[in-house]
Every structure is written in structure tokens, then in C-alpha cells.
Image (spheres, rainbow, N blue to C red):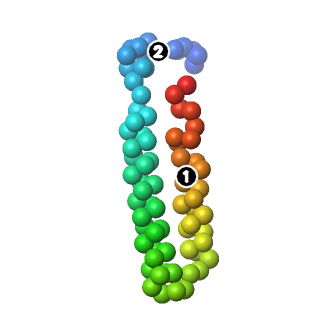
Amino acid sequence: MASPSAQPNLDPSWVAESNLPQILAVTGVFNLLALISVGLRLYARIGLLRTPGRDDFMMVLAVVSIFFFHPTQFDLHT
């Protein structure tokens, strides 16, 4: 039985590849969709109905937190 610390033989070109552009694209699209949906809901609740609630405030906080925890804020290249 192989020891748990044994490293498999990996192709260096495969190890050098990065999925960072794809990951950032997917997270960016979903963040944009979230921002659009929250904006439309706020427009409907505040602009048309004039009845904002605590849930609307929490949604705004959630969208704001997206920008603080987005992967581009961290150094993922090292």
C-alpha cells in the first residue's frame, strides 16, 4: 500500500495550467445577475410600491458583501 505522503507523477504542463480566468468569469456573471435582480427588486419595492422592508436592506448588504469577498480581491496567482 502506498504511503499517504507519496506524490503522484504529474505532467508539468498540466500543473502549470490555471482555471482562474474561467472561475472569475463564472463568478462575475453570477455576481452581475445578483446585482441586476436586487436592483430590479429594489426598483419594484421602493420605486413603485414605496414599501421597503428589512429584507430589502439585508439584500443590499448581501450584494455589497459580494464586492468585498470577490476572488479578485485576493492574490490567487501565488
Q: Quadrant of residue 53?
A: bottom right
Q: Nearer the viewer, mark 2 or mark 1?
A: 1
Q: Amino acid at mark 2?
A: Pro
Q: Amino acid at mark 1?
A: Phe
In space, the residues marked 2 and 1 are separated at their CA atoms by 38 Å
Q: Position of residue 58 (x, y in %)?
A: 60, 69
Q: Left or right? Give the position of 76 relative to 36.
A: right
Q: Who's the residue at 47% across and 15% down the image? A: 8
Q: Position of residue 76 (x, y in %)?
A: 53, 32
Q: Residues within 10 Å of mark 2 (few under 14, many from 20)?
A: few
Instruction: State the residue position of label 2.
Output: 8
Q: Position of residue 45 (x, y in %)?
A: 49, 81
> Is tag 2's residue or tag 1's residue first in the polypeptide sequence?
2
Q: Quadrant of residue 51?
A: bottom right
Q: Secondary structure at mark 1?
A: helix
Q: Is residue 52 above or below residue 39?
A: below
Q: Is residue 45 above or below residue 1?
A: below
Q: Which mark is residue 67?
A: 1
Q: Secondary structure at mark 2?
A: loop
Residues 24 and 48: in front is 48
Q: Who's the residue at 49% across and 75% down the image? A: 42
Labelled pair 2, 1 in contact (Cβ < 8 Å): no
Q: Who's the residue at 46% across and 62% down the image? A: 35
Give the mark count.
Answer: 2
Q: Who's the residue at 42% across and 28% down the image? A: 18
Q: Position of residue 72 (x, y in %)?
A: 52, 40
